[in-house]
Image (cartoon, rainbow, N blue to C red):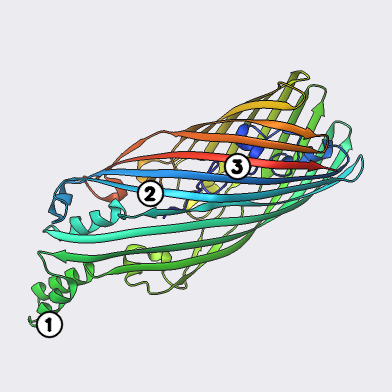
Amino acid sequence: MTTSSVFAGGLLTNTNQSAAYVRNPSRDAAIDVDAVYYNPAGVAFLDRGFHLSLNYQAAVQNRQISSTFKLYQFNLNNHTEYRDFNAKAVASVIPSIQFAYVINDKWSIASQFSIVGGGGTCEFKDGLSMFEGMIAGKILAPYTVNQSLTGNQIIYGLQVGATYKIINQLSVAIGLRGVYASMAYKGCMNGITVNGMNSAYLANIATMLPDGEEKNYLLATSQLISDYTLDCTQRGFGVTPIVGVDFKMGQWNVAVKYEFRTKLNLKNKSNNSENVDILMPEYKDGVSVRSDIPALFAIGVEYSPIKSLRLSGGFHHYHDKAAYGVASDVRDNTIEGLFGIEYDAHKVVTISAGMQRTKFGFGDEQIKDTNFNLSSWSIGVGAQFNCTRFMKVNVGYFHSFYEERDVQNANGIPTMNNNYNRTNDLVGASINFKF
């Protein structure tokens, strides 16, 4: 149940849009069919004719929350003050398609369909520390509780654009991406008791008491330990304007891309959601939740010292603070640095590797169970096989090394100390055609 991207990129942005990225994430100055996404102005430098790329990816991410809270010891089913809340986010099929048509020496058109955000299902079978901590911290007595939470997020993107080559060395691009967000969240917190008494029992006792503090306390406690259920879907549509510039001369290529902020209003439809407004009012039925995709500035450089070798680098700046919604709740904007290398080991085989450094701008007070993006180092390795003059195959593997985060007074609960961590693995394959 997180509002963050499952894969590589910013808070709400997936940058793993091709199998070529998986084997080498430094794609910002690439001249290939996946330039439709990474370097739209670079499409002008492809060979004349049609280009098509069919991409498949699969990803698995594990999320771990190790929580310490003395009041957990009041739990009659687990008397320790330590808890582990674990989840696995799985996306077995992540498709993307890129298409480009170089019409002549000046004009090109391009299109792409992909998963631009989210894409996986994440299940916390034992719930989250923030919810058990709330019960333990307010009851201050022996209790029981059962909980589970599952979230699914996917943001589809359909992009179209055109490229114009001003001179032989310089091209510009403009495009639009329509995005459709579809989210689904299910969860429950039930079986809550205090000193062996459930909500109905406490409410019944309260009805037999005269008006006063004791009656009010029992009624409030009865409300607190009643069942909580969540069954919410969210839908929303937005548009992303995109512009790009590419300058190519000799052994050098320099590219710039800017994606404007995508305004997203997600409309809630909640069924059978009892008391959801107490714990998570943002999931109440009929409520509109703002969750913009931040603007992105990207610049990339590629240098080929010899014909068979290409070195590349890139820089990303996500304008999180200027967006509205979860992405704006940060201390600093997200930045990324990338580096990659490709070598034509044979006329049939190109091997490659790359790295990506992602630095998020969260302060400790902004890290929560439902939103803990962690800074990371990632590496990608793989190869491209030139099967024929008209067909290429890409395969790659991508792994992220996350920086653990220790947070005191986690989720705003005094004396709760949480350790947050993740693992992430991604594989990809594609077939590229030219005709």
Image location of residue 408, percent across then percent down: 27, 41
Q: Considering only order in the chain, which callout, 3 or 1, is on the residue closer to the N terminus? A: 3
Q: Amino acid at mark 3?
A: Asn
Mark 2: give few (<14), some (14-19) or many (20+) Cα within 10 Å.
Answer: many
- Disc 1 to disc 2: CB gap under 8 Å: no
Q: Considering only order in the chain, which callout, 3 or 2, is on the residue closer to the N terminus? A: 3
Taking depth in this image into account, of 423 and 140 the one nearest to the observer is: 423
Q: Is residue 124 above or below residue 289?
A: above
Taking depth in this image into account, of 398 and 225 the one nearest to the observer is: 398
Real-space Cα distance between discs 2 and 3? 22 Å
- Give the foreground label among 1 and 2: 2
Residue with the mark numbered 2: 87
Q: Residue furthest right?
A: 104
- Residue at left 63%, top 46%? 56
Q: Amino acid at mark 2?
A: Ala
- Residue at left 38%, top 65%? 281
Q: Considering only order in the chain, which callout, 2 or 1, is on the residue closer to the N terminus? A: 2
Q: Which mark is residue 16?
A: 3
